Amino acid sequence: MAPRCGLRFFSAVISLQSSRMDKRVFYLGIDVGGTFTKVALIDRSGRIIAKEKVSSQGFSCKEAFLGSVRKCFADMLLKARVPAPSVRAIGIGLPGPVDPERGLVLSLTNIPGWKNFGLVDFLRRAFSIPVFIENDANAMALAEARKGAARGFSHALCLTLGTGVGGALIMDGRIYRGPMFMGGEVGHIPVVPDGPPCDCGGRGCLEQYAGNRAILAQASRLFGRPVALEDLSKMARKGHGRARKIWQDVGQRIGFAAAGVVNVFNPQVIVIGGGVSSAGSILIGAIRCALRRHAMRQLKGKVRIKRAQLGHDAGVLGAALLAKEKIEVPR
């Protein structure tokens, strides 16, 4: 009798554990990039429990994108031992303007064929759960506000310095999008009136001076040869005069633009992320100096400047948190 009773007890425990597991809640985040797309599964606490990364090559075909996401989803569920019905919603961060209310991708940077594409309906039909979309800079800002450098602040400006300059605003603890969903585009603040034309249609935008393409072009002119971004940062840290001058110029441009945002929106903290931020203290110092020079007297020295804390996970975590908050947080 003892072995049989033990078997019944073991079966009951397994059944109870499975029941409890089925009651757990998870959210799927997708961070679509021009080169790679990241997919992550988070629990209700916002902890990433599984993640995958795939090439974005071929994503001009929507079915290729869907196939990659489906495979990542299945692989993560298997690894994390999560039943599919426990995943409540999907959040997606995209590198370009989106219309979250209608679920449309207005255009997608570096991936053709997505103009005015109804991505929410497309994925909702495939997964049969709610889907929410957001600009990738906004997703990064949400992650830093909830789990990273801007945690504890209700008003924040977040900048992602990479190929371009992405910007996002957190106001009263929420993403500020604006009536046309273009709020926070700090990279397109004009900093030089007659500067070079920008893809946005303006001229002299911050992105033309603080994006990594512009930085590397300036370094190539000064050194007479191509210089990698990482090498430029290392040279500056070692005291190389020309390398330091490049980063100081970049920081001054960023600080000048940020001062305008500070004067209008009065954020408590500025979070700097992206590959360009690896320049570290010399860049942050130049931003801080320019901010003190150009911000209103009452705000000088009162806005904290911090490096982003979440690294490469910020975008995908922010996308998943977007889904979680849409489902769980009453509006």
Image (spheres, rainbow, N blue to C red):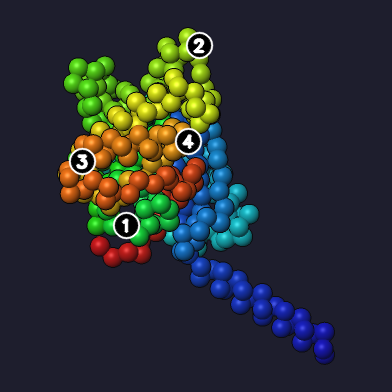
Q: Name the residue under label 1.
A: 153
Specify the label residue 295 is tagged with.
3
* Nearest-to-viewer mark from 1 and 3: 3
Q: Is mark 4 on a helix, strand or loop?
A: helix
Q: Which mark is residue 68?
A: none
- Contact (CB < 8 A) between labels 1 and 3? no
Return the disc, 4 or 2, that comes first in the chain's sequence.
2
Q: Position of residue 63 (x, y in %)?
A: 47, 35
* Residue 162 percent location from the top left of the image: 41, 31
Q: Distance between the residues labelled 3 and 2?
A: 37 Å
Q: What residue type is labelled 3?
A: Ala
Q: In this view, does 104 lie to the left or right of 264?
A: right
Reading the image, the residue beneath label 2 is: 225
Is residue 200 visible to the viewer in this orientation of the structure? no
Residue annotated with mark 4: 278
Looking at the picture, tell me which residue is in the foreground, 176 or 20. 176
- The kind of secondary structure element at disc 3 is loop
The residue sitting at 48% across, 35% down in the picture is 278
Residue at x 66% of width, y 74% of height: 14
Of the numbered discs 2 and 1, the one sitting upstream in the chain is 1
**What amino acid is at disc 1?**
Phe
**Position in image of residue 59 (x %, y %):** 46, 31
